[in-house]
Every structure is written in C-alpha cells, then in structure tokens.
Image (cartoon, rainbow, N blue to C red):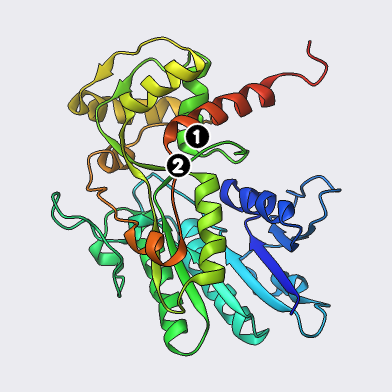
Amino acid sequence: MERLFIITGADGHLGGTLVRLLRRRKASVRGLVLPGHMPPAGDGVAYFQGDVRDRESLRPLFADIPAGTAVYLIHTAGIVDISGEVLPLVRAVNVDGTKNILALCREYAVERLVYVSSVHAIPEGDKAQVLHEIRRFDPDAVVGGYAKTKAEATQAVLDAAAEGLDAVVVHPSGILGPYDRTGNHMVQLVSDYLQGKLPACVTGGYDFVDVRDVALGCLLAAEKGRAGECYILSNRHYEIRELLGILRSVAGGRRLPVLPMWMARAAAPGLQWVARLRKQRPLYTKYSLYTLRSNDKFSHDKATAELGYRPRDLVQTLRDTAAWLRRKETPADGS
C-alpha cells in the first residue's frame, strides 16, 4: 500500500526536520505551512498554506489523495510559549487546532495520527521522582500556560484514540539542533553565545534532545507505536553551563560568568522589558527560569524498548548546530 505523510507545521523546527528526513527516504509528503510562509519549491514536497485554527483551510491537505493510499499525519504545529500564562492565541493553536486535526483525521479516515505533545504536559511530581508516561492529562496538574495547553490537547487525542482513532502521542523534551528558522529559544541561546551576545549563563538546566532524534522518534512512533499509547522522546539532563562548555570546546567562544538563580530571577522582568522595547523575544522569563529548576528526570525506556529510539550525545548536536548557524549567517557570495 502506498503511504503519504502529512506534516503540519512543516516550516517549523521539528516539522522541517521531519520533511528533510522523509525526503531522504523518498516518501510522499504534504506539508502544512502558515499563509505567507511558503518554503522554496523544488524539494519534492507538496506544500499547502493553512491555519490549524481554521478547519476549512486544512481541507486541501486531504484533497485528491489516490485511492488505496494510507495517510499518516504527524501533527507538529503548535506554539511554544515561555511567558507562563495561558495566552488566547496559544490555546487556540495548541488546543483548538489539535481538535480540528482530530476531526479531519476521522473525516478523511487517516491511517494513523502522531501527535507531538511535550514533556511539559506530564506533572513533575517529587523532585527525586523519575518521570514516565502517564494515562491521563490534567491542565491543572502542570505549571505554565504552554504546559496546560499541551496537557489539554494530549487528553483530547487520547480520548479520540479511546473512541477508535488510531493515534499515538510523543513527548519530546527540550529540542535543540540545526535547521531552525523559527526562533527556537535554545538555538537562539547558542546563536547569541557564538556571536558574543550572551553576557552570562544561569545555574540550572534541563533535558535537551536533538531535533533529528525527535524527528526519527516521530517516524518510529508512526511505524511501531501502539495506538492510544504515549512515548517520551527525551535524552538526559544538561546544565546550561555544561551545554555552553561543550559549545566552547567544539566551536569556540569565551567562558561566561554563571549567575545564581536568585539573581537571574531578579533580572528577568527587566530583561523582558528591554526585549519588548527592542521587539525581541526575551531569552529568560520567570517561567523559563522555573523550568531550569524543575524535575526533568524523564525516562525514554519505553520508547527505546518499543520503538528502537536512541538519542545521541549533545556534543554532536552542538557541533552541527554551530556549523549550521555559521553557514546560515555567511552570505552566499562569501563577502
């Protein structure tokens, strides 16, 4: 049976990486991008402009699919927000947009849906507790607007699976890696460091994973995952200063002072104010600093055992990210 992959958020960091991987496999791919965000032609992918908040704008994605084709939809489209509040736009995209995708998957008899949730949808529990996949998701059990919207959307996907939709959920941890053109916060941190714009780093850290490993994990979930199940796609904990130390060793740069968390928290409102004046996104907010001190002991044992998921060491990730950023920032004529 012929297979067609539909990737929402195909111009995003993860979505674009998935498209790259599928192109290398010579798979048939349709990608959803936001209006006005059309990628360059010639990569063999059929791109459609639409907004997950508008169900009717998504119908062209499903039009004229040859009979007998098995459609696999990987829903990566979403807004990652570190403000800490449940912003109306974030909820509309992350929750209502996912519900629109669920309705269309039923209507067009999609073979399998892979929903990209987040580890933030999983309650932290005790700081010493190792976090595994859970069966039910509650927005009130997690902290921060982004986490709440991902928890609500994840439960909607699992409810649809219980009603018969073939759906699998993956939970990536903090994504990092090359090919980002949409403002991934951690890629921004790497870029700022390499350009000498990062004045200091903070104590704390998180579980960071290569975007290419998450993309492969999504495809493994599409191929091997059990319907109605969740799979954590994590790596391991890295302190921010450890991450920058690796980056310094593979790409150069200067040693930075390390701010204690209390000082970073005190400075965060001022940094957000300056960022607003400059019409930039702040690198650190009260919520992102909270995250750097939260429980991130995520176990990917289930994904490894059932899917064959094996994340790489971040040394290679940072080396490749630095190389990609430098190629991106170098003019084509070399001047």
Residue 95 is at least partly visible in this image:
yes
Check disc 2 and report its element: helix, strand or loop.
loop
What mark, if any, has residue 317 been given in the picture?
1
Residue at coordinates 55% horizontally, 77% vertically from top-left? 102
Q: Residue at x 28, y 38 (%)?
A: 292
Which mark's residue is nearer the viewer, 2 or 1?
A: 2
Instruction: Tell me if 268 is positioned left or right of 63 in this view.
Output: left
User: At which x and y percent is residue 277?
Assistant: 49, 27
Please state which of residues 168 and 185 is positioned toward the viewer in this rendering.
168
Give the distance between the C-alpha atoms of the residues marked 2 and 1, in whole angstroms: 8 Å
Q: Callout 1: few (<14), some (14-19), or many (20+) C-alpha neighbours within 10 Å?
A: many
Camera-side residue of 130 and 280: 130
Q: Determine if residue 277 is in view.
A: no
Mark 2 sits on what residue?
312
Q: Is residue 243 above or below residue 154?
A: above
The picture places residue 301, in percent across and down from the top left corner, at 33, 59
Q: Is residue 230 left or right of residue 96?
A: left
Q: Circle 1 sits in a helix, a strand or a loop, which is it?
A: helix
Closest to the observer, 93 or 258: 258
Residue 87 image position (x, y, % from top left): 43, 55
Q: Callout 2: few (<14), some (14-19), or many (20+) C-alpha neighbours within 10 Å?
A: some
Residue type at the position of mark 1? Thr
**Are dots 2 and 1 in contact, CB under 8 Å?**
yes
